[in-house]
Image (tube, grey):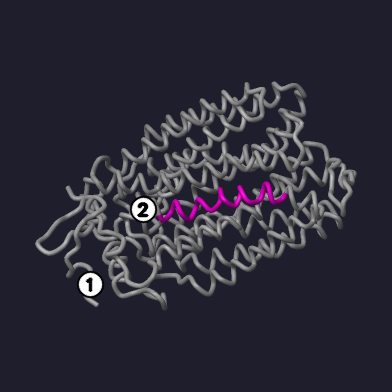
């Protein structure tokens, strides 16, 4: 099979070859990887978020359907809202510890085994969660911390994988497909957890999602490979396309340029944006079930169905946003930097407006509609944030994700405890409004920081060869006599 550079490719997506011209067979292998990683992140978030729903049934009176009768079950655990905040945030104590190590391992050795192992261990601990919590409160805390440790490698591992699999012209869409699984996982976990709690009691929540994640692990290890060249099922055409597109950007990095990474303004722009997005996301993830019950007196089942809507919107927007971002770049309408700044800045400002509006909503339908619009704005921003590490430093993307997610995870630790404190200290609606105001303000600050410091350009310290350090124009496409192929670097 001839290499892509020796073939005539007619551009059909800007200057990017048509998808059908980059592979043979029934489906491109890189999209198989994207779909399976999508399912992986769906499982990751069901394992992460199931406790947010289960804890309501564990600590409150709740109804169960037994035969043809409705039975009211008393709370099994007498935890106040501050204790619940500690339980919900304990996952992130472990999660924050493995971001940087996970990024380093992904850069050095690849992300496939790292991601699969992390999910497998978390799934096993999830299955044993009912035993742990009934045995000892501190067993539950320890189990959640360990789950966080093993899930902490997820994002860095995925970036490590995509640094070897994703052609630059398709990065936004492939990364967006992968990460959007987290929102569909949240869509699944909320209503299904409510159903399982009502018909089978709360332990069934942990058994169901733990077993589902283990099944995914078996498929992942069997069908996904660390690099395209190791893939047993990839066509020669697709292999050549990926290798020619990525060039030396996806190489396994040698020594880390730590000083240059840590003094890079675009890196800290990503960190600020990641922290901001996480603040809004984790506030909704951990507090929305409690807010719906406290503010609108919704039953667990009814609340979880409505709460799933914002995450369904999020998953859809992320996937659409990835394709739109690649289209804008591919057609030359916007540079990568302009695309990233437009998506992130306007997304954050929109989220801030809708959060403030939602804080004053007295109707549950109106509240969910406003939250859904806010989440849509935030996920437009995430379309830029999630792939920006690969934009500025492809060889070190896993490490950069580790850095940004380490600091971003602080939001997951702070928000449950802060929300619990604010609501507990002020039992009126003002306690909850403060939660929304703080989140809105955080998004405004994040938008300003990214606008000032953000970039979509490959940074000089990320380039392997000195001869291409002078590049300057983003995502240039070069035509020659026989082909149109992407030059991933920026030509002065």
Depth-wise, is mark 2 or mark 1 nearer the camera? Answer: 1
* 466 lies above or below 244: above
Which residue lies at the image location 55% right of the left edge and 57% below the top edge? Answer: 154
Q: Which residue is mark 2?
A: 393
Residue 456, image x and y in percent?
33, 44
Residue 3: mark: 1
Residue 300 position, x and y percent, is 75, 41
Residue lying farthest to the left in this orientation = 481
Q: Is residue 30 left or right of residue 361?
A: left
- Left or right: residue 204 versus residue 453 is right
Residue 482's disc number: none
For label 2, count other residues whose C-alpha is less than 10 Å away and answer few (under 14), some (14-19) or many (20+): many
Q: How far across and how far down the image is residue 363, in percent?
A: 66, 25
Q: Is residue 311 magenta?
A: no
| Disc nearer the start of the sequence (2/1) | 1
Residue 182: in magenta span: yes
Are there few (<14), some (14-19), or many (20+) residues within 10 Å of tag 1? some
Front residue of this view, candidates 40 and 370: 370
Q: Which image quadrant is residue 416 in?
A: top right
Disc 2 is placed on an element classified as loop
Q: Is residue 163 left or right of residue 370?
A: left
Q: Find residue 443 and report its horizontal and vertical position in percent.
A: 51, 31
- Between 202 and 451, the one lying in front of the other is 202
Height in image: 111 above or below 375?
Answer: below
Q: What is the distance, in whole Å, between disc 2 and disc 1 at their CAs?
A: 26 Å
Residue at image point 75% right, 34% down: 298
Q: Where the N terminus falls, by quadrant? A: bottom left
The residue located at (73%, 29%) in the rendering is 296
Q: Are marks 2 and 1 in contact (CB under 8 Å)?
A: no
Query: What stretch of residues is rendered in magenta?
Result: 174-193
């Amino acid at each position: 099979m001839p290499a892509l550079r020796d073939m005539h490719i007619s551009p059909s997506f800007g200057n990017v070859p048509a998808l059908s011209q980059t592979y043979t067979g029934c489906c491109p292998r890189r999209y198989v990887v994207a779909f399976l990683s999508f399912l992986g992140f769906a499982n990751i978030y069901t394992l992460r978020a199931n406790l947010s729903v289960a804890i309501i049934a564990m600590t409150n009176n709740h109804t169960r359907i037994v035969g043809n009768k409705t039975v009211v079950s008393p709370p099994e655990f007498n935890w106040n809202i501050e204790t619940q905040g500690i339980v919900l945030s304990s996952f992130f104590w472990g999660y924050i510890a493995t971001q940087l190590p996970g990024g380093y391992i992904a850069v050095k050795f690849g992300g496939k085994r790292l991601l699969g192992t992390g999910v497998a261990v978390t799934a096993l601990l999830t299955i044993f969660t009912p035993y742990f919590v009934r045995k000892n409160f501190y067993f539950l805390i320890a189990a959640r911390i360990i789950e966080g440790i093993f899930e902490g490698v997820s994002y860095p591992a995925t970036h490590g994988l995509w640094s070897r699999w994703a052609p630059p012209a398709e990065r936004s869409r492939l990364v967006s497909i992968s990460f959007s699984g987290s929102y569909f996982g949240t869509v699944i976990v909320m209503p299904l957890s409510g159903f399982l709690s009502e018909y089978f009691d709360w332990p069934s929540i942990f058994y169901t999602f733990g077993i589902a994640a283990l099944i995914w692990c078996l498929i992942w290890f069997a069908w996904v490979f660390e690099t395209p060249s190791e893939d047993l099922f990839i066509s020669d055409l697709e292999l050549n396309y990926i290798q020619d597109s990525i060039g030396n950007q996806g190489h396994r990095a040698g020594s880390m340029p730590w000083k240059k990474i840590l003094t890079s303004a675009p890196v800290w722009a990503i960190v600020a944006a990641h922290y901001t997005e996480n603040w809004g996301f984790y506030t909704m993830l951990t507090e929305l079930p409690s807010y719906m019950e406290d503010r609108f007196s919704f039953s667990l089942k009814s609340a979880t169905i409505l709460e799933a809507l914002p995450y369904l919107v999020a998953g859809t927007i992320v996937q659409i946003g990835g394709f739109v971002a690649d289209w804008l770049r591919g057609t030359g309408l916007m540079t990568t930097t302009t695309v990233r700044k437009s998506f992130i800045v306007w997304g954050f400002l929109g989220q801030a407006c809708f959060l403030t509006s939602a804080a004053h909503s007295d109707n549950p339908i109106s509240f969910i509609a406003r939250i859904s619009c806010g989440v849509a704005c935030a996920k437009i921003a995430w379309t830029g944030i999630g792939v920006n590490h690969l934009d500025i430093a492809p060889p070190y993307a896993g490490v950069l994700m580790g850095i940004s997610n380490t600091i971003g995870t602080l939001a997951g630790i702070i928000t449950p405890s802060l929300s619990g404190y604010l609501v507990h200290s002020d039992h009126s609606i003002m306690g909850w409004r403060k939660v929304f105001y703080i989140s809105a303000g955080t998004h405004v600050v994040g938008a300003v920081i990214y606008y000032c410091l953000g970039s979509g350009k490959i940074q000089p310290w990320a380039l392997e060869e000195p001869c291409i350090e002078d590049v300057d124009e983003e995502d240039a496409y070069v035509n020659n006599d026989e082909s149109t192929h992407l030059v991933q670097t920026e030509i002065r």
